[in-house]
Image (cartoon, helix red, strand yellow):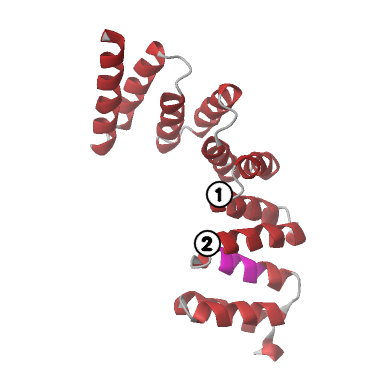
Amino acid sequence: MKCSLRYRLLRWQAVWYLMLGRQTAALACFDGLLAWRALDSYALASRAHVLAQLGRSEEAMSALEFMLRHHAHSAEAWFNLGYLRSACGRHATAMTAFRQAIEIDPRLDRAWYGLALALIEQERFDEALVALEHNTRLQPMSPYGWYQLARVQMQRGRPEEVFRIIGHLRGFEPDVAARLEGEAALRFPQAS
C-alpha cells in the first residue's frame, strides 16, 4: 500500500510540475517513478516526452527505444519514436517506426501522415500517395493530409488531381485551397 501511495503521489507531482512548465522537476519525478517500477509504461513514455520537450531528442529516442523493447505493443510510442526520428532527419528509420505503429493500430491517422512525410522526404511519391490516402480517409476534415496529397500529385505531374483536391478543400478550408491554387498555378500555368 505504501509503495502504491508513493507512486501515485510522484505521478501527481509530475503532472503538477508539467502544468507549471517545470519539465526538469517533472523529469525527476518520472525518474522516481521508474525507481519504483522500472518498466512502468506510463513513466517511460512520460519521461521520453519530457526529454523531447527539453530538446534532448537523442535521449528521448533512446528512452522510447528502451520502452519499446518492453512494451512493443504501444502504437503511440512507435509513432512518437517515428516523429522524433523524422524531426532529426532520420527518415528511413522513422518510416520503420511509423509502419510499426500502423501495424499495431491501422486507424492511427498521425502515423499514416508521418509515414507519408518521411516518404516525401525520400522522394518516394507513389508510396507517399498511398499513405496520404489512408490519412485523408481517417481524417477527412484535416487540411494537412489533403495539402500534402495535392503537393504529391504536383510532384507526380497530375494537375487534374491537384485541382480536384483544391475543389474539395474549398468546401471546408478555403485558405488552404487558395494557397494550393497559387502553388498549382505556378506549377501548371496552363491548367489554371
Q: What percent of the width, then of the height, locates residue 133?
A: 65, 63
> Quadrant of the image for the C terminus?
bottom right
Q: Secondary structure at mark 2?
A: loop
The amino acid at mark 1 is: Leu
Quick check: 32 left or right of 121?
left
Is residue 53 visible to us here? yes
Point 70% across, 42% down: residue: 92
Quick check: 41 left or right of 184?
left
Q: What percent of the width, then of the height, locates residue 61?
A: 55, 31
The amino acid at mark 2 is: Gln
Distance in Å between CA atoms under marks 2 and 1:
10 Å
Q: Earlier in the sequence, mark 2 or mark 1?
A: 1
Q: Return the residue at label 2.
A: 139
| Magenta-colored segment: predominant secondary structure | helix
Q: Return the residue at label 1.
A: 108
Q: What percent of the width, then of the height, locates residue 177?
A: 52, 78
Q: Which residues are magenta?
A: 145-151
